[in-house]
Structure formats: structure tokens, C-alpha cells
Amino acid sequence: MTAPSFTVQTAPAAGADLIGPAPAPDVHAQRQPSADSVLLSADNAYRFVQDTGTAALLAAAAIVRAPSPTSGRDPSELQESASGVDLAAPLGSTEAALAEASSLYLDDAVYFHHPRYAAHLNCPVALPAVAAEALVTSINTSMDTWDQSAGATLIERRLVRWAADLAGLGPAADGIFTSGGTQSNLQALLMARNRAVSPADGPLPERLAGWRIYASRDSHFSIVRSAVHLGLGEDAVVAIPVDRNHRMDPATLDRAMSLDAARGLRPLAVVATAGTTDFGAIDPLDDLASAARSKGAWFHVDAAYGCGLLASSTRRHWLAGIERADSVTVDFHKSFFQPIGSSALLVAEGSRFAHITHHAEYLNPDQDPDSPNQVDRSLQTTRRFDALKLWVTLRSLGSDVLGELFDATVDLAAEAGRLVEDTDELELAAPVQLGTVVFRFEPARELGVDASVVDRLQDLIRRSLYRSGEAMVAATTVTGRRHLKLTLLNPRTTVADVEAILEAVVRHGRAVARTEVTA
């Protein structure tokens, strides 16, 4: 099908009756732009409408004409275009700069909205959220203190209350928007660490010795990275084995904590995952909460991916036990179809933010306890108003619609798993749970491919598929063997799209297998 096209031109100044017409050019104007012409203000609001309209049309045109999720070009092919730009020689107009950006960025962007993008946990974005971003970037609110944000603070805090209620965390819950799941996980473990060591005396490095964090073998890499940032070290994270569905085993966790206790080690936190990156596995939250409580450990749930189930009318029970968490990570820019970044850390007891609060006289003095300063809860100081896009989405569509969209991706993945099982040269690695499908290409015997080469084939298939531009899939390692992965987070992707992706995987697999045999 030929994609429709339209002409990109300067957008008309919508609402011109409010902002006035563009002034006639001043022939006596200075060559160098002045602050009045460059910085957004009431005097040049017409330029804001024109320039953002031009940018929106360029983006829309790129989305419409994108025939595939990627152009397939490698870094070496694109490097010269970017490195050859002379940043000391401006082009003289926003229109020219946007046209250049279109060539450098949009022509070779990776398009998550495309139905055959199935690589990572990236979603197409809700239209109301995209529109809301224009408000956020133009007003440029900073969320650290009330006197920089005013009503924006109240919107964020209302959304935090809504999310905490979805998770069932109780009336004392609180939270903060973050840049993403990695930051949310880091902050949760920082709060857990400070809570654990605060009763002790002595230098902090000494107080950190002997603490352990327990997480599944398949937990997000940010857990280990957080332990390093917090001065605990990689060895502080104990990787608990998983079952055939890649869920943490509570009995093994309990034994590991008991054995460590016998060695004089102390449990800092138990981290459960509600939707692992590779398998979408949801750890048994209720059982893990009990294990954590029995040992006095902080219980954190990383629901960066699985948080979409909070809005599901049919699968919400999959998260049973999340209401017992001390803290929860939710990524709205994954499962609520929001633009990056839109994430939050929810905490069951808001008073525990005191473990990370620091008062600065010039910013949030403790003599002003009645001002709702969000910096008291955040690792960031200057922070974007990333809550507004979710607010506008909810007020436009409602959470039920978002839940239905997420449910559609789970249904699609289940069908994709069945298609893999029905394809002779594909082998499913584990039962499908959320929206990811992990599998291997196993070449037919008549191709004569040595078993030692099959691992390398997976990465060659992924690269060949990428270079063709037909589709994008991911790759991962499971018990030492390389696998391919579909990550299905687009409700517009159809079964026919999945069939086409798998057909392409087999076709490219056969081609690279033959090449390996003859090499």
C-alpha cells in the first residue's frame, strides 16, 4: 500500500485573534537575533505557533511515509552526516534547522508506532499525551518547588494518589514522578538503605557492610547497578533462581535469606518483578511479601512493565500482593502508552521520603513545611512536568481504555506464542505471559548447520532483519544460549503482522544459515 503524502509548510497561526498577526519584517533589524526574537514571550507567540506547527507537520509526514520501523542503516553509514555539521555556522532560521533535523533524525529514526516494530519495551504514544507535551515544553515548568510549579504540583500529586489507589497501597501512600524505571528502582533502594542503616552509628561505609538485596535471576539490571551506586557493591545482590515460568521461587528465597542470616548477613530488601524484560514474568508477589516481612526487609515491586495490568478489567488479579509493597515502580511510558519519560515511584508510607529529604535554605527551607515542595521526595532538583501528558490522556480517554489497549498486547503475544510453536524451524523458550515471546531459530537438518553455530545465527538473523527494514526483533541469552525475542507493545499490531515477522525470521534464518555453511 502506498502511504499518503502531504506537503509540509509553515502552519497558520491558529488562534490569531488572541495572539495577533505576525508583524511585517523590519528592514532595519539587526543581523544578530535579539532576545525579543529568540526567546518565547507574549510578543512572539505567533512564532511559537508557526514553528511548532512546522515541526508537527514534519513529524506527521515522517510517520505517514515510514514504510517500515527502520531504514536499516548502520552507525557507520550515518556518522558522517552528523559529524559533518558545523555547529558554529547557524542556518539562520528555525525552518531550515528543522529541515536539517528531519534529514538527520527523522529519515533514519526507529518508529515504535510501526506494527512490525517488535524489539524492545517501547510503545506507540497516545495522541492526547503528544498534544500535552506542547504545553509542557512551552511553559517549561520546573517541578522542584511550589513557587516554580504551582498548579502543576497539585496535578502531579493527584496523579500519584490515583496510581497509589490503583495499586492498593493505602491512604498513607505517596510518590513522585521520575525519569524512568531505573531511577525509580534506585530511589526505592536508596530509601530502603537509609531506613536500614539510620539506627546505627559510625561512618556510612562501615554501616553498609553485610546488607543483602534479593532479586530474581531475571530481574532488571538496574537492581545491580543501584547496589553499586549505593555503595553496597554487586555482591550485595543475591540472584534467586526462577521456575520454568521464570518467576522467583519463594522457598528458595527463604532458604537464601536464612543461610545468609547464619553467616551474619542482613536482608536489606526483596525486589520482586511484575513483568520481567525478557519473559514478562510476574513473581509471586504475595508470597514474596510474606518472606520479606518475616525477615524485616523492605519489599519493592518493579512493575515498570506490568503496571499496565493495574488498569486491566480482566487481569488486575495477576498483580495480587502488590498492595503489600513498601514501594512500587510504574512506567507509564511503557504500558500506559505515554511519551518518554513518564514514570513514578510509589511508596506505601509517604513519611518514609524523610529518609532522602534534604533542606536547602535557598530552595526548600524546613521553616516552610506547608509548601508542597516535590524536591523533598525526588532525587532530581530541576524536573520536567512529565505528569501532565498522563493527566490529559486520562481526562481524554480514561484508564479503562488504556487497560484495554494493554490487554490487547497480551492477547496478541499469546497468539504469537502459538504461531511460534506451530512453525517447524522455531522453538519457544518458555510459556508466554505478558507481551514478550522468546524463541530460537533452529535450522532444518538438511541445511547441515553445526550446533555450535546456531547461537551465532540468532544475532545474524536479527541484524539481517534490521538491515532489510522489514521488521525489528530483539535478542537475548537464556541459560547461555542466544535467542530471539518479540516484544509486542503495540495494540495496532495484528496477527498478520506477527505472521509476517516470523516468516521473515525463518526466511532470513535460512539465508544466513546457508551462508554460514558455505563460508
Image: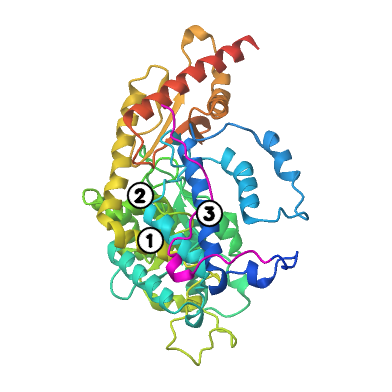
Q: Position of residue 271 (x, y in %)?
A: 43, 57
Q: Is residue 96 above or below residue 30?
A: above
The structure residue drawn at horizontal position 71% and vertical position 53%, both measured from the top left corner, is 91
x, y percent for residue 200: 53, 78
Instruction: Residue 202: give x, y in percent of width and height.
Output: 61, 79
| Residue range highlighted in magenta | 1-26
Identity of the residue furthest to the bottom in this view = 367
Along the line of sight, the residue nearer the viewer: 354 or 265: 354
Residue sitting nearer the eye, 128 or 208: 128
Quadrant of the frame with the N terminus: top left
Disc 3 target residue: 222
- The image quadrant of residue 391 is bottom left
Say which amino acid is labelled 1.
Leu
Which mark, residue 283? 2
| Residue matched to label 1 | 390
Which of pointers 3 and 2 lies earlier in the amino acid sequence? 3
Which quadrant of the rendered structure holds the C terminus? Answer: top right
Q: Is residue 4 within the magenta segment?
A: yes
Query: What is the spatial separation of the Cα atoms under label 3 and label 1, in whole angstroms?
Result: 24 Å
**Labelled pair 2, 1 in contact (Cβ < 8 Å):** no
Q: Main secondary structure of the magenta part?
A: loop
Q: For the residue marked with disc 3, what is the amino acid?
A: Ser
Q: Secondary structure at mark 1?
A: helix
